[in-house]
Amino acid sequence: GENVEQHPSTLSVQEGDSAVIKCTYSDSASNYFPWYKQELGKRPQLIIDIRSNVGEKKDQRIAVTLNKTAKHFSLHITETQPEDSAVYFCAASIRQAGTALIFGKGTTLSVSS
Amino acid sequence: EAGVAQSPRYKIIEKRQSVAFWCNPISGHATLYWYQQILGQGPKLLIQFQNNGVVDDSQLPKDRFSAERLKGVDSTLKIQPAKLEDSAVYLCASSPGFLDTQYFGPGTRLTVL
């Protein structure tokens, strides 16, 4: 079945450094790729998304790149801050009957000051 | 804009008991999703509704789980009978339509003893 793999599972950086999280997907029909941030005990919150007709999207310190040929997409966070510490999930739309999302297993990002 | 509402926030039951969760999506959102999030994993889709019709329930354990969305607004998810492995956070999300941003509710944390 469809699958999304996410790496790394944990990532520790110093404040001000950059962080990169990578995901690969299996369904070539996937065309929507959101990233969610989830703080402990809280709901997932969308931080950025990209659609298949775009190769890169940026929003202040956050950027996402998409390579449809290789079926992978990445989240880039620059100038990390302690409040960026959270679990980040990538997701890809799945064809099936609807267009729900399949999520990766998450990356725990820790930013130390 | 009010967010997705869910209740209860926490529930503890014994195995073989039944339990029901309620979700009120963002006003005007046609698409509603129920996800199961086991500790340390990404959300997993259980069922997707478009208005009051089921679009995808391929991953719903139909021998014990059921869901409905009356009048295309509120939705309930029921488990009967519950098993230990059902312990998880049950997240409801809504979006205006297919491939639109999904907004998550706070979730219901279920513990089955």
Image (cartoon, coloured by chain):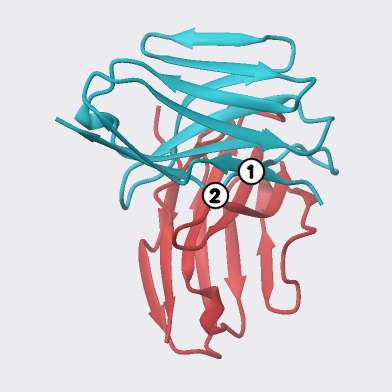
Task: Please identify which colour was used for chain A in the image.
Answer: cyan
Of residue A70 and residue B74, the one placed in the foreground of this image is A70
Kind of residue at badge 1: Glu
| Residue B30 in sight in this render | no
| Residue B55 picture location, percent across and down | 80, 47
Task: Classify residue B48 as left or right of residue A43.
Answer: right
The residue at 32%/53% (across/down) is A41
Task: Classify residue B83 as left or right of residue A87.
Answer: right
The numbered mark at residue B99 is none
Is B19 rendered above or below residue A17? below
Q: Are marks 2 and 1 on the same chain?
A: yes
Kind of residue at badge 2: Lys
Of residue B72 and residue A80, the one placed in the foreground of this image is A80
Q: Secondary structure at mark 1?
A: strand
Is B99 rendered above or below residue A86? above
| Residue A30 in sight in this render | yes
Task: Please identify which colour was used for chain B in the image.
Answer: red
Q: Secondary structure at mark 2?
A: loop
User: The disc numbered 2 marks a residue on which chain?
Assistant: A
| Residue farthest left in this picture | A113
| Residue A98 picture location, percent across and down | 79, 40
Callout 2 touching callout 1 (CB < 8 Å): yes
Q: Mark 2 sits on what residue?
A: A105
The residue at 52%/33% (across/down) is B27
| Residue A13 picture location, percent across and down | 29, 31
Task: Write down the quadrant of residue B72 in the picture.
Answer: top right
Q: Tag 1: Cα neighbours inside 10 Å, few (<14), some, or many (≥20)?
A: some
Answer with mark 2 or mark 1, whichever residue precedes in sequence.
1
Q: Tag 2: Cα neighbours inside 10 Å, few (<14), some, or many (≥20)?
A: many
Q: Mark 1 sits on what residue?
A: A5
